[in-house]
Amino acid sequence: MARVTNIGGSILIVSHLNANESKGMKWLEDVVFSGLKAEFRERREAIKKQQTQFYSWSIHIHGGEGQLIKDEDDEEVMSYGPAVYIIKKKSVPADRAKELFSSKKKDAKNVESENGDETELTLPPVKVEFLTYD
């Protein structure tokens, strides 16, 4: 997924699963976040050697406010309907990247030592924003 877009580009996904509901959030974690983590693991060595551009991801989730509907048991449940996910790739300045991509770890794999501190390269936080419309 991460290789299909340039920095500044976006991936647009329309899904019947909405992250406002548990099934939609599970899909977001299982598919989108795991894809971003896999891509980061592939690039980790290039990041350590600073042979790659640094970038981070943000996800805008567009959907409705939700409506109460009756389920098959005639119980009222909240339904949010489909969602549009816009996944954006953003460049990160090199000086900010060190702070975002590193976390202090002891006895960890893929560890880099700098000034006696043990740091591990980790996927920077993915900004998730929910946008709703009437």
Image: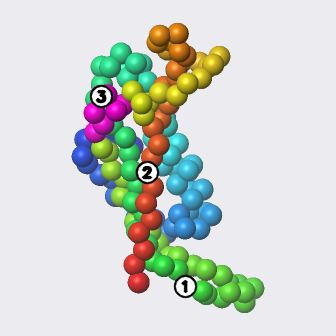
Residue 54 is left or right of residue 70, and the answer is left
Nearer the viewer's eye, disc 1 or disc 3? 3
Give the residue at mark 1: 67
Q: Earlier in the sequence, mark 1 or mark 3?
A: 1
Residue lying at 39% horizontally and 27% vertically, measured from the top left = 98
Q: Amino acid at mark 1?
A: Gln
Q: Which residue is mark 2?
A: 127
C-alpha separation, residue under disc 1 versus residue under disc 3: 45 Å
Mark 3 or mark 2, which has the lower sequence index? Answer: 3
Look at the image and give the residue range highlighted in magenta.
Answer: 91-97
Mark 1, Cα crowd under 10 Å, few <14 / some 14-19 / many 20+, is few
**Residue at 42% in and 30% down:** 99
Residue 70 colored in magenta in the image? no
- Could you tell me which secondary element the residue under label 1 belongs to? strand
Q: Is residue 42 visible?
A: no
| Placement of 86 over or under 110, stated as above or below | below
Name the residue at 30% across, 28% down. 94
Q: Is residue 40 left or right of residue 92?
A: right
In front: label 1 or label 2: 2
Name which residue type carries label 3.
Ala
In the rendered image, which residue does mark 3 sit on? 94
> Which of the 4 image quadrants contains residue 6?
top left
Query: Which quadrant is the N terminus positioned in?
Result: top left
Contact (CB < 8 A) between labels 1 and 3? Answer: no
